[in-house]
Structure formats: structure tokens, C-alpha cells
Amino acid sequence: MDPKLINDCVHCGFCLPTCPTYVLWGEEMDSPRGRIHLMSQHVEGTPMTPEMAGHFDACLGCMACVTACPSGVQYDRLIEQTRVVVEREHERPPQERAVRGIVFSLFPYPRRLRLLRPTLGPARRMAPFLSRVNPSLGAMAGLAPRVARRQRLPRVVRARGERRAVVGMLLGCVQREFFPQVNAATARVLSMEGCDVVIPPGQGCCGALSVHSGQEAQAKRLARRTVRTFEKAGVDTVVVNAAGCGSSMKEYATLLGYDPGFRVMDLSEFLAELGPVAPRHPLPRTVAYHDACHLAHAQGVRSQPRQLLSDIPELELREIPESAICCGSAGTYNLLQPEAARDLGDRKAKAVESTGAQLLVSANPGCTMQIAAAMRRAGADIRVAHTAEVLDASLRGAAL
């Protein structure tokens, strides 16, 4: 924990109404400035007690406080540093260690996730029983999506028409195995906008889930492998369609101590910079756009996806109330803190339902699973799609 970063906080309180856990509980120690106070105590010699670790664990790492802070406090760096300390110094109960062991030996490994695909339907039906056994296992089962057929992508997807750019594409872990249609749509959209899309084989996890949870050694190992993969591919831009992955990859220089030989851009960010050339066909839909925290707060990408959606003829874009408040997904948060995550998910589902939209658009697989599960609990009938899927349907003139 960097004392200089800690001392940047003047405890003004602007962060309080933006913090999901403070909104839920109204507890000072579960606000950003309260957690910074605990960090300061630890730096000054207070041991990492279970109570202190609990307040740090309860943070979603959504970075809404970073957006709201007038003093420029780098809470994103502070909470990541703090979680490394928590993992090093705090002895967790056996059951908690077991759940974390399952999560971090499973989710950063696409091939292991692939083995889960046939079990997702039965797991979803068993969620109430598993919740009684362990809340985290129940949450894991309840979040299970209805997966699409696997779609193999070639190593290179060629540009249609004049080539305007050459980009690499990250497949991700959860995105690749649970939402393969999103990656296929992403490649098609980039191709139709004049890009050669290089998809290196042997891609693994980018390390996002690990870095957000204090698993520093695992995060560095996975990040180095990702850097090597795309440097070998020879691209100078890597396009990412998962907000959490893009956020972490943009911080590789901080994590690894050196800059990778490429820039990282979110899909919507890249397309907005490139500019449209492919004609859009009408999509007569009312759409609510969900701001993924690691896109809006961590990367500052807000206007680009809205503009891309608004440019589609006959598509009506609607804003979600409390859009800055996290849906409760937050990487592995909905698995490790299932009760708080469920409350936030239900809150987000009510906000989405209030828009009356026919379709919810999200740019992060964790958000998609979290909100879809909350909407199912609420009995609401709304489809969740990725920005890439909406653009793909418009560019191809296909049904959505």
C-alpha cells in the first residue's frame, strides 16, 4: 500500500453516493474513504485483522469512486495493492479457501471452462439446493448462462473491401467458452469495417480476474503469456470486447513493469476512432445500454458505445437509472460475495426493467450473466446482447 497514494485522500465524501456497498449498508468502513482509512492504519502498524480484511473483500473494485473523486485519488491502484497484502497476510477459513481455490483454478483457464459447458443447464436447475450447501456454489450455478454453439474462428479474418487496419483480437476466457457468438460477431464487425483481424492460437487468460483479486503471481504469469502471444502475432493494436479484460490489459505496464509492444483498445473505442464505412441497416428495437464499470469508470469509455448504437437506424437508445452503480458482478465478486452481489443485481434489474426496453446491451460477460440472472429472478423477459452483436445484426441486415 503506497502511503503517498493514501495521503491523496482528503476524506471529502464525494465518493460515498457512488459506492455500491455504502449505498447498500451506509457503513463508513464500507466506503472508499473508510477503506483508505483502514489502509492507513495498516501502513502505520495495525495488523490485518479478519474485520479489516472483510471490509476490503466487500469492495467491488468498480472504480465509480475514481470517477467521482475531485482530488484524483488512485483508489484503483490502492485496492489492488491492498488485495495483494490481504492474500499474503490474512488467513482465510477453510471453506472460503476452498471456494477461492475452485474459482482461481477454473475461471482463468478456458479449456477447463469448456468442460463445464454441458453441465450449465443442470447446474442452473440445482442452484437452490447448492445455495443451501454453500452460497458461493449456489451463486455460481445460478449465474450459468444458456450457452450458444461453439464457433471456431480462423487465425485471420480478412477485411471486406479495402483494408483500413490490422488488429489482434483477444478471445478471453468466459467470453470464449460461454459467449462464443460475441467473439464471432466482433470478428465480423471488424472485418466489415475494413480490418484484418488476427486471432492468435493458443491464447490464454489475460490475468484480469487474478489481478482484481490480489492473486499477483498468477496475474503476472498470465499477463506475460498474453503479451508474448500478441507480440509474436506482430500486431500493434489489440481489440478487446470484455470490459474487465481491457481494463487490466491497459494496466500491464504497472503490473509487469514494462510496456507491451502494442496498444489495447475496447471494441467500441476502436470503432469510434476508426470511423464507420459499412452501411447500417435498420433495427427497430428499444435498447437499454448498461455501463460496465471497468469500461465506464476504469477505461473512461462511455460515449463511444452509445454513439455506435445511436447511429443504427430505427434503434431507440434508453438510459438506465443509477447507471453508475455496479450491477454486482465485478469479476469474481458475485461468486465470493454472493449476498451483496445478489442485492446489487436485483437493484440493477429493477432499474433496467423501468426503462421498458426490449433489449439490454452490455459490454462485459460478467455483467451479462449477473443481470440476466437477476432479471430471471424478477420474472422479467428481456434479452441481453453485446454491443458487437447489435452492430453485427445491423451491418448484415439480420434479425436480432
Image (cartoon, helix red, strand yellow):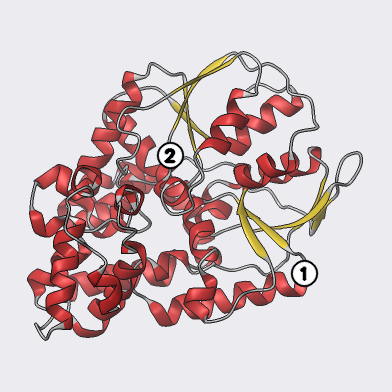
The N terminus, quarter of image: bottom left
Q: Which residue is mark 2?
A: 291
Residue 103 against residue 28 in the figure, above or below: below
Q: Position of residue 344 (x, y in %)?
A: 24, 41
User: CA–CA distance between discs 2 and 1?
Assistant: 31 Å
Q: Position of residue 236 (x, y in %)?
A: 74, 64
Question: Between residues 206 and 7, which one lies in front from this camera angle?
Answer: 7
Label 2 environment density (alpha carbons within 10 Å; few <14, some 14–19, many ≥20): many
255 relative position to 134: left or right: right
Q: Are marks 2 and 1 in contact (CB under 8 Å)?
A: no
Question: Between residues 323 and 132, which one lies in front from this camera angle?
Answer: 323
128 relative position to 194: left or right: left
Q: Which residue is mark 1?
A: 233
The C terminus, quarter of image: top right
Task: Look at label 1 and name its amino acid.
Answer: Ala
At x 39%, y 46%, the residue is: 144
SS for dot 2: loop
Q: Is residue 268 visible?
A: yes
Task: Look at label 2 and name its amino acid.
Answer: Asp
At x 36%, y 68%, the residue is: 77
Label 1 environment density (alpha carbons within 10 Å; few <14, some 14–19, many ≥20): some
Question: Between residues 314 and 372, which one lies in front from this camera angle?
Answer: 314
209 relative position to 225: left or right: left
Question: Between residues 222 and 161, which one lies in front from this camera angle?
Answer: 161
Q: Position of residue 120 (x, y in %)?
A: 42, 48
